[in-house]
Amino acid sequence: MQIIAAISFVTIALLIILLSIYIRIYRKSKAEFTLGLIFFAGMLMLHNVIAIYAYFLMAPLYNVALLPYFVAIHGAEVIGIAALLRVTI
């Protein structure tokens, strides 16, 4: 469970960087597409905040057999967001 939370914290950090870049771009261009990217990154951040909260609050309710799948899901998410950050910069 701590591994999942750590991966989610990394994801949140990457999303904060993406959000700051997207906000800077929006201020310069006023492009509606950038607003969509800001909304997308914000929703992903909300997802990760809720996931961290839920994992710690409901940890006893999760079956241990599910944890590797959660790690894989969050691992894939952080890799995808890192790739998005890489092409954004």
Image: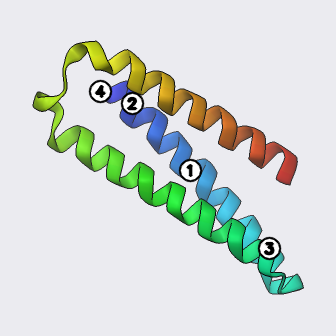
**Viewer-nearest of discs 1 and 3:** 3
Dots 3 and 4: beta carbons under 8 Å?
no
Dots 2 and 4: beta carbons under 8 Å?
yes
Instruction: Classify mark 4: residues with Cα within 10 Å, few (<14), some (14-19) or many (20+).
Output: some
Where residue 30 appears, as percent x and y from the top left, is 83, 87
Could you tell whether 6 is left or right of 37 in the image? left
Instruction: Kindly report the distance in space between the C-alpha atoms of the residues bearing marks 3 and 4.
Output: 36 Å
Instruction: Classify mark 3: residues with Cα within 10 Å, few (<14), some (14-19) or many (20+).
Output: few
**For the residue marked with disc 1, what is the amino acid?**
Ala
Dots 1 and 2: beta carbons under 8 Å?
no
Helix, strand, or loop for circle 3?
Answer: helix
Helix, strand, or loop for circle 4?
Answer: loop
Q: Is residue 9 above or below residue 88?
A: above
The residue under the point 84% across, 81% down is 31
Residue beneath disc 2? 4
Kindly indicate the quadrant of the structure image that contains residue 2. Answer: top left
Where residue 24 appears, as percent x and y from the top left, is 78, 76
**For the residue marked with disc 3, what is the amino acid?**
Phe
Q: Earlier in the sequence, mark 3 or mark 4?
A: 4
- The answer to whether residue 89 is seen in the rendering is no
Instruction: Kindly report the distance in space between the C-alpha atoms of the residues bearing marks 1 and 2.
Output: 14 Å
Residue beneath disc 3? 33
The residue under the point 69% across, 71% down is 36
Residue beneath disc 4? 1
Where residue 13 appears, as percent x and y from the top left, is 56, 50
